[in-house]
Amino acid sequence: MNNSVVIMGVAGCGKSSLGAALALALGIPLVEGDNFHSATSRSKMSQGIALTDADRDGWLDTLCEQLRAYPEGVVLTCSALKKVYRNRLRQAAPSLRFAFLDISRTDAQVRVQARAKEHFFATTLVDSQFATLEVPTGEAGVLRLDAMASLAELQAQLAAWLLTKETT
């Protein structure tokens, strides 16, 4: 069984924390999507300029390459805000699953503000993330998780789902 999963959601939902915990628990690689943004995209985001579909195009190509590089399974952190982005990732790994970390705008804003000194993402972009988000309700192979649950609880729920889910 391929255990590849994308931890998705808006900025501040906990993608990186859950991704690291899950990869460790499952003994599979972690690919941190933020590490693959271009310098131009990072600069835009640090200035509070929202990325466009064109800005994300090459980034998504690279993430698809990363998914194909780990046929035995990988944890990928990626906002995957639009269905078209998720479908593109699915094309790279047909059995790919998604864990959607659902968080309120207020809670996301608080978390992004708290990490402002360590992360390139400007706090002013939280609203644009919510404006872009196409909630994956009804899509096959998606597990909705409450981003405000404890990291241990989220990791346990997601690991159990991945290990029992046969196909998307």
Image (cartoon, rainbow, N blue to C red):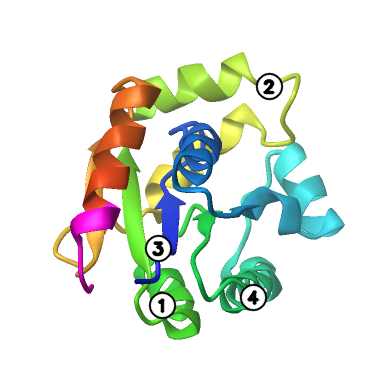
Q: Counting residues from the N terminus, which is met first, the one under dot 4 or under dot 1?
A: 4
Q: Is residue 166 magenta?
A: yes
Q: Counting residues from the N terminus, which is met first, the one under dot 1 or under dot 2?
A: 1
Q: Amino acid at mark 4?
A: Ala
> What number is the disc on residue 69?
4
Q: Is residue 12 above or below residue 82?
A: above
> Which quadrant of the structure image shows residue 55?
bottom right
Percent of width and height locating residue 91: 44, 85
Residue highlighted by disc 2: 116
Magenta span of residues: 162-168
Q: Counting residues from the N terminus, which is met first, the one under dot 3 or under dot 1?
A: 3
Percent of width and height locating residue 48: 68, 39
In space, the residues marked 3 and 4 are separated at their CA atoms by 13 Å
Q: Give the residue displayed 65% in from the left and 77% down from the top.
A: 65
Percent of width and height locating residue 111: 50, 20
Q: Counting residues from the N terminus, which is met first, the one under dot 2 or under dot 3?
A: 3
Residue highlighted by disc 3: 3
Q: Give the residue displayed 74% in from the left and 35% down from the top.
A: 120
Horizontally, residue 83 falls left or right of residue 112, namely: left
Residue highlighted by disc 1: 90
Secondary structure under badge 1? helix
In this view, the mark in front (3 or 1): 3
Horizontally, residue 26 falls left or right of residue 76, namely: left
Crowding at mark 3 (Cα within 10 Å: few <14, some 14-19, many 20+): many
Horizontally, residue 41 falls left or right of residue 155, namely: right
In the picture, which quadrant includes the N terminus?
bottom left
Q: Are marks 2 and 3 in contact (CB under 8 Å)?
A: no
Q: Amino acid at mark 1?
A: Arg
